[in-house]
Amino acid sequence: MNPAFIFSGYEGLISGLMNQPERIYLSPPHLDGDEIELVKEALDSNWIAPAGPQIEEFEKELAAYHQVQHAIALNSGTAALHLALILAGIKPGDLVLCSTFTFIASANPIKYLGAQPVFIDAESESWGMCPSALQNALESYQHIGIKPKAVIVANVYGQPANLPRIKELCEHWDVILIEDNAEALGAELGNRPSGAFGIFSVLSFNGNKLVTSSGGGALLINDSEHAEKALLLATQAKEPGLGYTHRHLGFNYRISNILAALGRAQFAKLKHRIMLRRDLFSQYQQQLSDLPIKFMPEPSWARSTRWLTCLTLSPDCRVSPQEICEGMEQENIECRPAWKPLHRQPLYRDAEYFGGMVAEDLFHRGLCLPSGSDMAEAERNRVVTTFRSLIH
């Protein structure tokens, strides 16, 4: 092949890349430089292991904010959920009811323990777990003499599920409620924050969250005995004392002191970041409301963080979420379809399911727009203009 032809091809590729507009991500970390001071403090103290004063302060701040007695800072939300299920006494063969409209990490820890997930549909009002479908599942199992051990309710896209009603159902049937608040840190229900309703509640500080420690999570607990056991299990179940004694199977789940410092700096900005995300949602709503779309509703009983701006396409819209995502990608803009229901995932094809078609409809018509809290005005306008050009 002619070398000049090869060079010409590469030259065209490089030129195309150089002319491509800067990428707009779905939910990038928002770092403003204030993180450096606390991270430097952690480094200067020489506490870089999964122990230290930054972890202790982070846990105190998280517990106080969520109105709970204990917060255990960990290296991921998945680790927190895994520990919550262990503390709930989940054993192989147990039934755990779980939101179907959520990321798969909400269900995988059930499988880690050999238990059986049972998926519950979403409701249109909040996109969270449907209380009626949950009640139907609990009644159906009671009828055949089976008692589920726990319920994992996921708060999705920054919005709480109907937690008061779901908590009421769990208490009535004596089932442990685990609140997966990985996507909704900072959301509120009346005068209570989401994350304050479960026997165990889970947070995530992944890189795409409102508060990020690059990677991390937390387990919220009110019971001191459970908190003590969670901390033991998260540190390889090493018994107190000088000897290396281990009576239980433990895990390497603690967060590092450095990442806790980063998380603390971010957590201090939570209210402001929520304001910025809600402002972006309002701007999208104002500039796109004439199109055949419907934005994710906000129930009267909750206040969403609008972690992600989500919408559904009208049934008569002639493009799919997949086509819009592909069109936005051509302009170097990241968009994502809504969550694929977990009961439709190949991994969980044999799991039982209760509900209708709400979650599936949200998946088939749902879409998430770029929602970074530090998006410049020019980037916001570029998203709006590109999105409008793709709707027809």
Image (tube, rainbow, N blue to C red):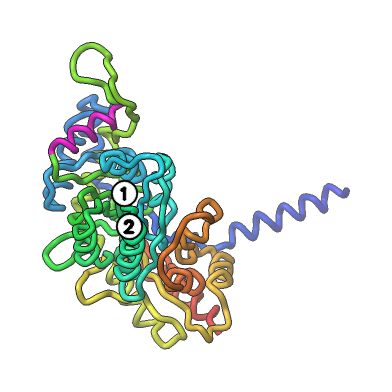
In the picture, which quadrant includes the C terminus? Answer: bottom right
* Closest to the observer, 54 or 365: 365
Q: Check disc 2 and give the amino acid type.
A: Glu
**Disc 2: which residue:** 183
Pointers 2 and 1 in contact (CB under 8 A)?
yes
* Closest to the observer, 331 or 391: 391
Element carrying mark 2: loop
User: Is residue 206 one of those drawn in magenta?
Assistant: no
Q: Position of residue 89 (x, y in %)?
A: 28, 40
Q: Residue at x 24, y 11 (%)?
A: 243
Q: Residue at x 88, y 48 (%)?
A: 1
Q: Residue at x 26, y 39 (%)?
A: 87
Q: Check disc 1 and give the amino acid type.
A: Ser
Q: Residue at x 36, y 44 (%)?
A: 78
**Disc 1: which residue:** 204
User: How far apart, in angstroms, are the residues tagged by discs 2 and 1?
Assistant: 7 Å
**In the rendered image of this protein, does residue 74 appear above or below residue 178?**
above
**In the rendered image of this protein, does residue 283 appear above or below residue 119?**
below
* Closest to the observer, 85 or 141: 141
Magenta residues? 224-236
User: Is residue 225 one of those drawn in magenta?
Assistant: yes
